[in-house]
Amino acid sequence: MITKDSKNIIVADDSEFFRVKLSDILTEAGHKVRIVQGGAELIKEIQINPRGIDMILLDLQMPNIDGFGVLEWINNNGFRGKFHILAITGVYETTSVMERLKKLGAEGLMTKAFTPEEIVFRVNKALFPDKAAKPIDPRIPVSFPVDFSIGDVTSTGYLLNISASGMFLHTKKTIFPGTVLHIRFTLPGSDKLLNIKGIVKWCTQMSGEKSLFGGAGIQFTKPSPEDRQMLKEFVEAELKKLGF
């Protein structure tokens, strides 16, 4: 979730709320983020230092020069393929504009209903294609509550991603590597309560500080074949929804 390979990302959006939200999410995920308020300002940034840009998150609905106009300018001025571009929309249906965006060089389209997990998932998948290519055990971004017990103490946290063999547990508690947990949760769309044992393999925080992505990476230990199959089918279905 949190990368040590920091990239330079520009967020272009005329909404201060979404500029700040995206900047906070990506900064905490380990990236260096600059923000601009519109298409004209973004074009100036590209002209100044195109090599200093790894990715642009581009709002399609901006005054004066909108996202489509920026993409056309990028194509007409020799900058196509110089950096990754993910488009963001609060209005358009993804199916109605995706073909046009692909022709203009954008690599994907997200709605503004994104969760922090979804934005980091999409950004890192585009920035690090070698790491994302054909994973043996793919993880997908999720956000739903999970109960977990350490000994006789039960707490509630949130899943931020999950695979058939493990998950990332978001919690303010510090859980050290090697800790054994009993985890209980229900997958969206299912009424079966999964009760799985897991072990902490790594932890992002050692002092319980507040963080968007604070928590622990959990490896499931011997889930039942039925539970593993259910997890696998859930992950595969979610990947299709995400377009992967």
Image (cartoon, rainbow, N blue to C red):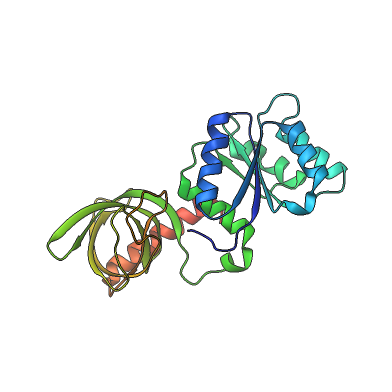
Please state if 176 lies on the left or on the right of 84 as rendered. Answer: left
Coordinates of residue 173 in the picture (x, y in percent):
28, 56
Q: In which quarter of the image is the C terminus?
A: bottom right
- Residue lying at the far left of the rendered structure: 152
In the image, residue 151 above or below residue 91 = below
Residue extending furthest toward the right: 77
Estimate the x, y position of residue 32 in percent, counting from the top left: 61, 51
Q: Is residue 79 left or right of residue 231?
A: right
Q: Residue 192 location in percent, x, y? A: 23, 55
Is residue 69 toward the left or the right of residue 90 in the image? right
**What x and y, as percent, mark residue 169?**
34, 58
Q: Which of 68 and 234 is in front in this view?
A: 68
As drawn, 175 above or below 91: below
When asked about the image quadrant of residue 6, the answer is bottom right
Tell me what residue is drawn at x 64 percent, y 56 percent.
7
Q: Residue at x 55, y 38 (%)?
A: 111
Q: Residue at x 62, y 56 (%)?
A: 126
Q: Is residue 81 visible?
A: no
Q: Residue at x 62, y 68 (%)?
A: 130
Is 217 left, or right, of 147 in this rendering? right
Residue extending farthest to the front is 207
Residue 234 in view of the camera: yes
Number of marks:
0
Would you identify the image quadrant in which residue 15 lies? top right
